[in-house]
Amino acid sequence: TAATPGSCGVKRATAATVGAASASASFGGTAGVGVGLAASVALNAIGTDIYGAKSTNKVSAYGLRSRLGAGGALTIDAKSDQSIDAEVVAASVAITGGGTAGVGVAGSGAAARNYISVDTTAYIDGDGAAAGGIDGASIHLGALDESTINANVGAAGVAAALGGTAGVGVGVGVGLAKNVIENNVKAYVQNTNETLDATGAVTISAKQDATI
């Protein structure tokens, strides 16, 4: 028997938008104290759990123990194109006023953890029992990964304090992001007992083109 492989591709995407806000206002005859706190967290994972432990997804295009023959181009392509887009924002405001003293404290924190782990493989493993091996006008095996992570994390804290004698305002904002792409990309030919024959070019390529 003869077969002409085509191509195999997959696309996975996830998007997350997370926001948190708080406001505090305090006014006292003698002293006013206001505290505002806000926090937001985004956890996104493809091929792992939310802590980064791998449960790897696989994208494969292959010929397995088969006689493969094509009058034209023999092409086996595997492409993976995962994407994570995360927007995480936290903001807090504290306003205080007091006849003698005012104290305002505002704090916010935003964090994002994003993981992608996918194995992408294009291969020929074995050529079956029939004579003839693998042949075509040209032979191409290609594996390509174009995973992307886009994460924007922002945090802001604003504090205002008004006091007849003293006013103290403290605002703190902290933003953290951890982005990991841990993909394997392979293309190969193995265990062919007969010939790998092409009148034109034979190309085998594996490319990792992930971006964060």
Image (cartoon, rainbow, N blue to C red):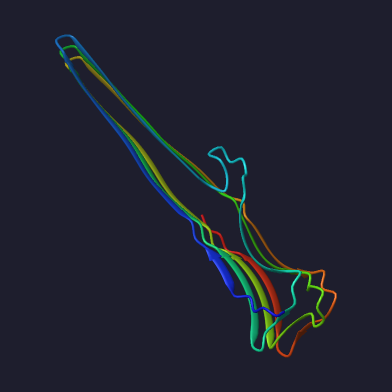
Name the residue: 57% across, 44% down.
48
| Residue 92 x, y percent position in the rendering | 29, 31
Classify 1 as above or below 15.
Answer: below
In the image, 159 versus 58, the foreground residue is: 58
Residue positioned 56% across, 40% down in the render: 49
In the image, is residue 106 above or below residue 151?
A: above
Q: Is residue 82 visible?
A: yes
Q: Residue shown at 17%/9% (left/top)?
A: 30
Instruction: Tell whether 36 sits left or right of 150.
Output: left
Relative horizontal placement of residue 125, taking residue 113 as reference (left or right): right
- Where, by quadrant of the figure, is residue 124 drawn? bottom right
Q: Residue furthest front?
A: 1
Determine which quarter of the picture holds residue 100: top left
Task: Work out whether 121 lies above or below 44.
Answer: below
Residue at the limit of the structure toward the right, as seen here: 193
Q: Is residue 65 shown above or below 212?
A: below
Q: Position of residue 43 (x, y in %)?
A: 47, 40
User: Foreground residue, 20 or 165?
Assistant: 20
Indicate the position of residue 63 as horizontal and vertical percent values. Answer: 70, 70
Left or right: where does residue 179 sit relative to residue 155? right
Quadrant where the image shows the N terminus: bottom right
Count all numbered tags in the image, as a single digit: 0
